[in-house]
Amino acid sequence: MAFREGSSSRWRLVAVARLTFVMALALACTEELTTPVKCPPNCPGSGIIVVDTLLDLVPGGDTSFSGYVGNGDGSGILISNNLPWADFRALVRFPPRPDSVAINVDTFATYTVDSVTLLISLQARDTSVGGLRLYMYRMPVSLDSTASFNDVESNLIPANLIDSIRIPDSARSQDFTLKFKGADLAKIEPAPGDSGRISIGMRVAAGNRQTGIRIGSRSSPTDAPTWTTFVTANFVDPSRSRRTMQFTAEISVTVMANPPTPAPDQLLVGSLPSSRALLRFQLPEYIRDSAQILRATLEMVPVGPIYGLNGDPATLQLMQILTDQGAKSPNQPLSAAVFRLPTSFNDTVRFEIPQLVGLWKTTKTAPTAVFLRLTPEGASFSIPIFYGTRSPTGKPHLRITYAKAFDFQRP
Amino acid sequence: MRALLCGVGLLALTASNAMAQSSLFGVRGLGLPGYGYSARARATGGAFGLIDPESTLNPGALVGVPVITATFNVTPEWRWTTTPAGTGDLRDTRFPLATIGGPIPRTPFNFRISYSSYADHDFALASADSVFLRGETVHVADTIKSTGGLADIGLTGAWRGPGGWNIGAALHFITGSSRISLRRQFSDTAFLPVAQQTQLSASGIGGAIGLVRRLAGPISIALMARADGHASVDVDSIHAFNVDLPYTLGGSLAWRLSPRFIIAGQGIFQTWSSANSDLIQAGGVGSADTYQASLGWEYASHPRGPGGYFLRLGGHYGTLPFYFIQGYQPREAGVAAGYGTRLGRGRAGLDFSLEYTYRWDDAGNKERALMLTTQFSVRP
């Protein structure tokens, strides 16, 4: 009987112990809610103090540097029709076409041209303007990447017209191929003395409306202008005489009627060749030491309205630089902040950069400087110019909202 | 030996979580004070706190532990708070007391190691406001949350003296920290949230003496006195300020009406006003002396045997030390009931207490709390 009593008691003990343990674990995993109070009077500490302040950039530490993407080295080239802020024409030159084709390793033969195609890729257009037509003209092959707007424009005359492409209103980005054969071949064939080269100038028209398009450049991996010649070799075996010669452009440049000329105290971003603005900041010690950055906004005032092509937006990007070496400062591959420019913009450009300022605050060795650039670089219709720190008005500012260190020790 | 190891294990398990009840009125100052009550003492409204051997309040009561005993308490709590800013429902669970101790063989002495809450600084507050930033009104939601408090690690010795004089002394190591975090969320998400945190730690040393003596017939008296010196408060390991800790005086009278029925009354007085100037100097809202009066009884079904069960009932009224609003000392009143049983021929015990406490001040802040404490004890 005693044994049975002990066994029962032990069983109860174990059961209760297990129950208690499980209950403790279950109850420990409870939700945490809060009590509503009025702070700071009912809360420990000093209350949260948030400060908004305007910081100047390093005076004279900002500069525009040019030449990051050369004319034609961008992904596209620009053609416009009397845009008020930027009138563009395009020049494309193809490399020399040989006067013979290889039959075998050591056998070459002259050829007869059967037909020629010219491929142009449309990358962007103003979708609000219809009736677009792209005109192509023969250019002197002596024109190269240093050609001026007038050099090209003076050759855009009816006598030099090769052909034109009607761009459908529905086309956003599309490849267009012109084919020449028979009597039309003379329009596109290299002239004697041109060493097998052809050079083409382009302009765009849409009735009397101002507009523009962007086409692929020689640097575009998939959209480069392409000149293809289909020939029949003068060879005894007809089955081996068909040949094709294909060339992408060796020069593709945009020429601009009136390149921007910013004043020395202004910062040019974009344009051709592309410019970037180097901006240097100074963070006060009281922010570096104990402030928590809540919001940091770089405010830049444009000198005038910034226009762009409808349907081909440009984006301003801030790039954190790794070491401050002036114009040749290497920068992070990813942008710290972006600002997408609308078609027409005449307000202060604001970049939100709290993470960047937080990085400067925590990493004392990180240079407090950024590059401001425009994308697509070397291929944008927008040409922003901002006031710099040397300007008497409209200087760029860094507006920082920060929280002071909370005084936790007030019990 | 196994019991000792088990007890040490329990202490280690609770070391990171042991706290007393949290409260709206534990937000300021050092927090809400704890008394080291066992589930038995809690079930009598605190009235048995000075005579209960398993509570840590009175070192002299330790002689009542007949064999080595390890105890462990868990207290889930439900709270309903009302402030002028709104109402809130809260739930949490704490582990307010763990002890291991008992008689030293072949000597008239008892010894105990205990871990209890000295002041609980566990809270989460929320407030809403609006601020004017960059020319616009932005709504903000703030939360400030604290986890931690001060723990009381006690080393207690007691002596079974002749003539029913049971005398004890204790050394108390007061230590602990609160991890306080602050967050502000803005309605305009362009502003990153404010998120800051710190660790407040404090330490001090105190000592206590106490006695329990049976007077004429069924009446026993218990007295204790404790001095805690001061706490040195550090913020992120840098000394910030000192706070004087209180003297504590307590007295209790217990009357065994029958072998099965005990009734007891208790009063405790603490000189928390000694911390007032230090807290105000540190930017706080100050403190005041406190007292607590309790009355309770216990019924034992088998008063002479190891088994059976216990029924308990009690209530208390008192004041709390730290102002929530300057000049309005909080008060509290509560009732409690409990049940206890002994298992395995007295080798284990299970005690429950259910407490309902109402706390308030005259500035419109109120709080109701329901606490269920379970104590598990092992006696090899």
Image (spheres, rainbow, N blue to C red):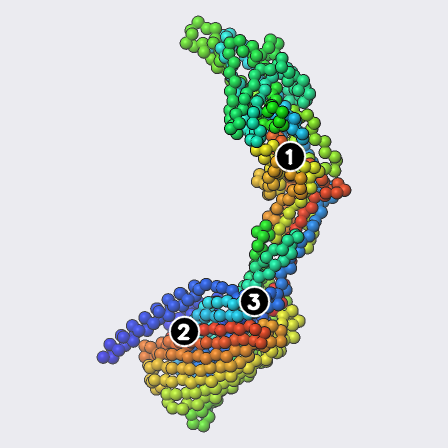
Q: Chain of mark 3?
A: B
Q: Nearer the viewer, mark 3 or mark 2?
A: 3
Q: Which amino acid type is marked by label 3? A: Ala
Q: Do badges 1 and 2 share one subunit?
A: no
Q: Which amino acid type is marked by label 2? A: Thr
The label number, if any, that marks residue A382 in the structure image: none
Numbered label tally: 3
Q: Quadrant of residue A308?
A: top right
Q: Are marks 1 and 2 in contact (CB under 8 Å)?
A: no
Residue receiving disc 2 = B374
Q: Nearer the viewer, residue B221 or A302?
A: A302
Q: Residues within 10 Å of mark 3 (few under 14, many from 20)?
A: some
Q: Quadrant of residue B350?
A: bottom left
Q: In which quadrant of the rendered image does the N terminus of chain A lie? A: bottom left
Q: Nearer the viewer, residue A275 or A384?
A: A384
User: Element under label 2?
Assistant: strand
Q: Is residue A364 above or below residue A382?
A: below
Residue receiving disc 1 = A307
3D distance between C-alphas at marks 1 and 3: 52 Å
Q: Residues within 10 Å of mark 1 (few under 14, many from 20)?
A: many
User: Element under label 1?
Assistant: strand
Residue receiving disc 3 = B85
Residue A156 seen in the figure = yes
Q: Residues within 10 Å of mark 2 (few under 14, many from 20)?
A: many
> Which residue occupies the extreme front position in the image?
A208
Residue at (35, 79) in percent of width and height: B342
Q: Is residue A256 left or right of residue B222?
A: right
Point out the tag, 3 or 2, that comes first from the N-terminus: 3
Residue A222 seen in the figure = no
User: Element under label 3?
Assistant: loop
Q: Do badges 3 and 2 share one subunit?
A: yes
